[in-house]
Image: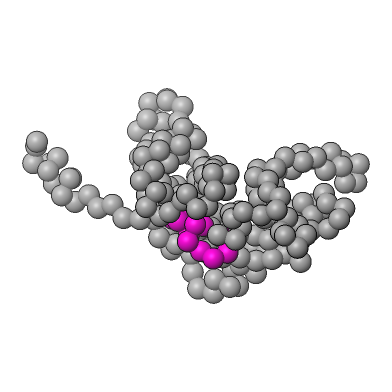
Amino acid sequence: MSADAGLLQDDLRLRPLAPSDSIVELTLLLHRAYARLGAMGLNYTAVDQSPDVTARRLGSVTHRWLQRIAEEGLEKWSAERIHGLAKVIRANLAASGVGAADLDAATQGVERALVNAVEDERGRWILGAHAQTHNEHRLTSAAGGVRRQLVIDRHFVEADGTRWVIDYKTSRHEGADPEGFLDRERERYRPQLARYGALFAEGSRQGLYFVLMPGWREVP
């Protein structure tokens, strides 16, 4: 091994994704890592992808794993099992288009989200057994004469007949006042949850579950 390679190895530090980490900064890191390939004329999305694309890919993989946890049964899942699947999660992210420079942080982010969901009281209620359950439930809305295909992340009916419509969010808060952030996100997504609620003539309650924090807001 060369002296330079040894220095690089000694200086390399890996750590979990923190709630304060910026998706914008991670995306800029991705741009720098792929700049040389872009200059060669190779077509890599990571050369100029937006922070929204980075966050959306992380969110998509997280949603698929939450679906698997709910369908297999919450009792079969633990933080230890989730951490043991890091290589599989990393492969999922790579297949979804997350670039090599961003894979470590994105993998840690998905792990953090899943561990939060199986250990947090609210997450366990959402993912647990109920009278009726659906995951990634596809439905068609015809409100106002406009047909829309909608996908509900988690939909269940409790024993007392209460119907819940849950939307998972992988938004992260990078500053003070997390409660204020959750309140603003509730208003941001209120129209989306209203469209979901309108699908059920018998009525429903809607909520947002923020798996990376974790955090919760019902949307009345």
Q: Give the range drawn in magenta.
A: 112-123
Name the residue: 87% across, 42% down: 142
As drawn, which residue projects farthest toward the top?
41
How many numbered dots are placed on residues in this image?
A: 0
Question: Residue 27's spot in the image, x, y percent?
Answer: 44, 47
Name the residue: 15% across, 49% down: 10
Magenta part, dominant SS = helix
Q: Is residue 17 magenta?
A: no
Question: Residue 125's spot in the image, x, y percent?
Answer: 60, 61
Please identify the quadrant where the C terminus is shown: bottom right
Question: Residue 14's spot in the image, x, y percent?
Answer: 28, 52
Q: Which one is nearer the viewer's eye here, 2 or 211? A: 211
Q: Is residue 68 left or right of residue 22?
A: right
Please identify the quadrant where the N terminus is shown: top left
Q: Which colour scheme is used?
A: one colour
Q: In this view, does 3 lie to the left or right of 153?
A: left
Q: Which one is nearer the viewer's eye here, 37 or 132? A: 132
Quarter where residue 158 is shown: bottom right
Name the residue: 49% across, 57% down: 118
From the viewer's perspective, is residue 58 above or below residue 120? above
- Confirm whether residue 64 shows in the render: yes
Q: Which one is nearer the viewer's eye here, 32 or 57? A: 57
Q: Is residue 122 magenta?
A: yes
From the viewer's perspective, is residue 41 above or below residue 193? above
- Confirm whether residue 104 shows in the render: no
Question: Residue 77's spot in the image, x, y percent?
Answer: 46, 51
Q: Is residue 10 left or right of residue 43?
A: left
Quarter where residue 205 is shown: bottom right
